[in-house]
Amino acid sequence: MKQRLLLCAFLCFLVLFGGYAGALAQEKYPSRPIDFICTWGVGGGSDQMVRTLAKLTEPILGVPLPVSNKPGASGNSGTTDLLAAKEDGYTIANYIADTLATVAAGQTRYKSEDIEWIVRTQNMPSFLFVKTDGPFADIHALLKAVKENPNKIKMAGLGFGTIDDITLRYLASKGYKMTLVPNPNPGERYASVLGGHNEVLYEQAGDIRQYLEAKQLKPVIVFAEKRFPAFPEVPCSKELGFEIFMPQFRCVIAKKGVPADRVKILSDAFVKAMQTPEWKKFNQEQYADEASTLAGPEFGRWVDGELKTMQRLMKEFGILK
């Protein structure tokens, strides 16, 4: 009798568990709001990207995408929260090149393999900017001054170990030595150049659009293999003999382990949102590459290539031992 009771209990457990598992497998996704973590502060380029994309994607997915800002540690505070969440696709986050640089430098507890790379939303070339009414008419005047005054010209950037730092060290290896003045606050970085405290700004054009339109700042070089259409008069690094191309990319990620079908639903929805006129207008205003969208395995392979490039350059310039 005891054995029969145990057998019955076991069979009941199997039925109940099987029904529960089947219900999970058949659960409509998404069926509730998806938390969208912005790993940078309110008002910045990443915040604008996340909020614009969330708004455009909500009607496609049929659920809200509430945005919460969790800045800090070069984007790693929010990323840590993402990696602590369940692997169910109901928590996603944005991610940028400078955060990937911290992975390349070995400054994080997680690896790129712990992340599900859903879609690249923006890919933007980096520039050097100077005051429009300052002493440097163009990149040639700036390089001449840098060459004649090693480490005297100050460049405002995000910080050490970032793509700003990598690019600066590359230029130093070619005989053009500037001093990096790190500041994680965008507004303060821009003000330091506008106020004459620093002579050069390393940034992406979309983030300082207001200063470009007001003719307060101007680009003198774009770090790319060809000139950027919005600034056809500005030379690219390749034509000047500088083989350094460190774009600032933004993307959407999830925790590794989210079911493949849910990853695809998210990816397809974001790609569809990025085909809308509203997104294309926003992307143009941000001076992002028109061919920014990249999803699926191809995007994962691209990220891996960027990571390896960062690690190679960091080793070459002594950032990574």
Image: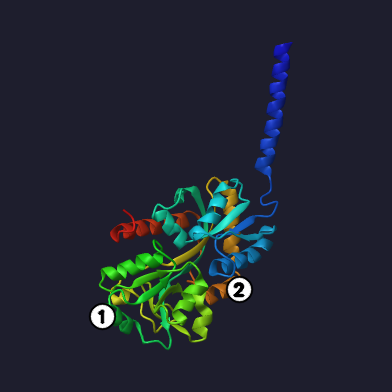
The residue carrying pointer 1 sits among few (fewer than 14), some (14 to 19) or many (20 or more) residues within 10 Å by Cα, namely few
Asked whether, in this view, residue 306 is left or right of residue 26, the answer is left
Q: In the image, 165: left or right of 53?
A: left
Do we see residue 275 in this rendering?
no
Dot 1: element? helix
Question: What percent of the width, then of the height, locates residue 23?
Answer: 69, 40
Is residue 297 placed above or below 289 in the rendered structure?
above
Kind of residue indicated by mark 1: Glu
Residue 97 spot, x, y in % from top left: 45, 62
Mark 2, other Cα within 10 Å: few <14 / some 14–19 / many ≥20: few
Residue in the picture at 72% in, 20% down: 8
Q: Quadrant of residue 163?
A: bottom left
Query: Looking at the picture, how far across and down is residue 248, in whole percent?
Result: 45, 66
The reply to whether the C-beta atoms of the residues labelled 1 and 2 are less than 8 Å apart is no
Q: Is residue 91 visible?
A: yes
Q: In this rendering, is residue 147 above or below 56? A: below
The disc placed on residue 277 is 2
Residue 233, located in which quarter of the rendered image? bottom left
Identified by mark 2, the residue type is: Pro
Quadrant for the N terminus in the image: top right
What's the CA distance linking mark 1 and mark 2? 48 Å
User: Which residue is drawn at the image coordinates 59% and 47% (left, top)?
Assistant: 85
Side of 265 relative to 156 (left or right): right
Look at mark 1 in the image and give the residue it sits on.
148
**Residue most extreme to the top:** 1
Who comes first in sequence, dot 1 or dot 2? 1
- Give the vertical position of 213 relative to 35 (above or below): below
Residue at 40% from the left image edge and 70% from the top image edge = 181
**Outermost residue, front side:** 197
Q: Nearer the viewer, mark 1 or mark 2?
A: 1
